[in-house]
Amino acid sequence: MEEATSAAHVTRARSDAVQRVLDQAVTEGGVPGVLARVRDLGGHRYATAGVADTWTRRARRPEDRFRIGSITKTFVATVVLNLVADGRLALEDTVERWLPGVVTGNGHDGTTITVRQLLDHTSGVFSHTADQPALSRKESYTPEELVAIAMAHPADFPAGTGWAYSNTNYVLAGMIVERVTGRPLADEIADRLARPLGLTGTSLPRGADPLLPAPHARHYTKLLSPDPDAPVYDVTELEPSPYGAAGGMISTAADLDGFFTALLGGHLLPPEQQREMFTVVPTEDWLPGAAYGLGVSRLTLPSGTEVWGMGGALFGSWSYVYGTREGTHLLAVNVNADWATGPWADPVGIFTDLLEAEFGRGADAGTP
């Protein structure tokens, strides 16, 4: 009985600390709304602040769908590693083997870049999303066109000699999945991950479909303007083809919880591929305290606590999903905006404070 009372106290303290950060994100950070889901040994709980829709003032709901940005990479890496486990490709295969003639020019050489280097961002491939003018010339893009945008720029470094976050790496990984399987990447994600895990709110949009399935929160952007008074735009309908395998997926907090709980718990990959996924390399100019594996990252919080998962950012929607290494304690959070003011420079600061509130060394005492 005493242990149960103590556990309830800890959960209550953490819940109070998380709610304080959520409320502050709205009142001081200026975000429209924020949704968090926590899973621990006692079950799961939700917390929200602000609104899903600034016009109707509807509150955020647990079942709301949202765009998950680069958390897409974790799904794609898991599919790739499943194919490795099936013996259909190898992490040391070159890009040239599967996509001959695609990665070439300006210091890019697909004969020297491996699948592993795509997944852990040590390939040196330029990120096509760094060329926003090129992504403004058309309404939609094929993966091949995205890679061509990257190839028009110098490589960041020779393969294997550095680290740089590149969305083109995962566009290429998605293309390799389709070449190996002969099927759309969306189908591989659905059949290998979403359906078996019951992730009914999770999908990779096909082609240029801009719609966000209901129910959903509205997504708001200031188009990366640093001006606190910059106009706000509703980008709930967003053409996803520039992001695709790098950041185009849609999900819910419950689905992200279910996926990462299974992944961290070792239920989606054989032991060898699980070890590969969670073997990390140092990062540069990315998230504070981060190291990167194959589609997943490890964060060391300011308090020294380590958590594992992935974050994702897209116009109007920023998300984090991180938890303990074994997956028994997890936080999934989404902000339906891409800015934050007050004590934070952007939503990453909000997410860091939420992780500290739930996992930090002071969390059990209720102090984030």
Image (cartoon, rainbow, N blue to C red):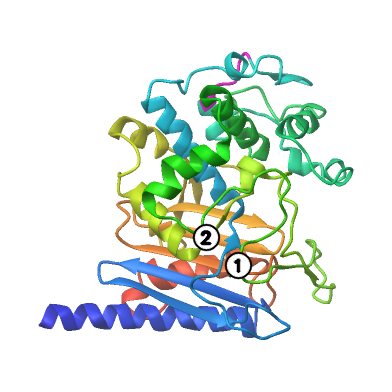
Mark 2 Cα shell of 10 Å, populated few (<14), some (14-19), many (≥20): many
Residue under numbered circle 2: 320
**Disc 1 marks which residue?**
214
Quadrant for the C terminus in the image: bottom left
Quadrant hosting residue 211? bottom right
Sequence-wise, the earlier of marks 2 and 1 is 1
Please state the horizontal and vertical placement of residue 198, each as a whole percent of the image: 39, 55
Q: Residue at x 58, y 70 (%)?
A: 215
Q: Can you tell which mark lies on residue 238? A: none
Residue 318: x %, y % from top left: 62, 62
Q: Is residue 360 visible?
A: no
Q: In the rendered view of the protein, which quadrant contains the N terminus?
A: bottom left
Amino acid, disc 2: Tyr
Label 1: how many Cα within 10 Å (few below 14, some 14–19, many 20+): few
Q: Give the range drawn in magenta.
A: 111-115
As for residue 320 lying within the magenta part, the answer is no
Does residue 213 sit above or below 151 in this rendering? below
- Could you tell me which residue is drawn at 44 percent across and 69 percent down? 356
Q: Is residue 103 above or below residue 146?
A: above
Q: Which amino acid does label 1 sit on?
A: Ala
Instruction: Point out the residue furthest to the left here.
Output: 1
| Prevailing SS of the magenta stretch | loop
Q: How far apart are marks 2 and 1 (CA)?
A: 21 Å
Residue 113, magenta (yes or no): yes
Residue nearest the observer in this picture, 288 or 261: 261
